[in-house]
Amino acid sequence: MGYVIEMIETEEQPTLIMKAITPVGDLPKILGKAFGDIIGYIMELGEQPIGPAFVGYFNMDMEKLEVEIGFPVSKELPGKGEILAGHIPAGKQVTCMYKGPYMEMPPAYEAITDWMKENGHTPKGVVYEFYYNSPEEVPESELLTKIVFLVA
């Protein structure tokens, strides 16, 4: 499958997030609760997210996956309890829009990694996935996920 991979440069993006360390099998349950809690708090503040839900992956340890779960917001907003003010750093990003089941994403990641090597870019740690829809809304084959690597 061919993937459209792009290099973009972005400004710092304010976010509201929750952090977790979890086995990958527990991720769907944790994400559902976190997304609901964060959306509820954003609405409580009288605000709206300005983009899709995301997860930042800080490692790939499937037993102790370290993640940041959140939404981009229009300006710095205060945290509350487990909900923290955060940001996605400014800088260069390599992005790819993926369509299909989450479990079939590895080839897209391989294509992005190959593209970065071929073009002389080094990943800077966090990898983000932005979820434009969910399995509750569409069949798995229609899921849209933007994969974003921060790069040097």
Image: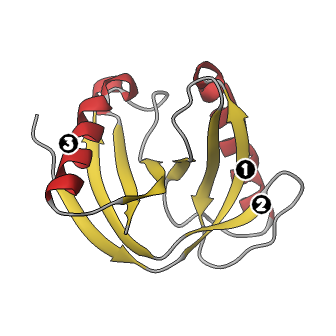
- Judged left or right of residue 50, residue 117 is left
What is the number of the mark on residue 48? none
Measured as percent of width and height from the top left, residue 121 is found at 27, 63
Measured as percent of width and height from the top left, residue 42 is found at 72, 61
Residue nearest the observer in this picture, 7 or 51: 7
From the image, state whether disc 2 or disc 3 is nearer to you.
Answer: 3
Sequence order check, earlier mark of 2 and 3? 2
Sequence order check, earlier mark of 2 and 1? 1
From the image, state whether disc 3 or disc 1 is nearer to you.
Answer: 3
Instruction: Tell me the residue that label 3 is attached to.
Output: 111
- Judged left or right of residue 90, residue 143 is left
Q: CA distance from mark 2 to mark 3?
A: 33 Å
- Residue at the spot 23% in from the left edge and 32% down from the top edge: 107
Mark 2 is surrounded, within 10 Å at the Cα level, by few (under 14), some (14 to 19) or many (20 or more) other residues, namely some
- Give the residue type that dot 3 points to: Ala
Q: Is residue 104 above or below residue 38?
A: above
| Residue 80 in which image quadrant | bottom right
Measured as percent of width and height from the top left, residue 147 is found at 36, 49
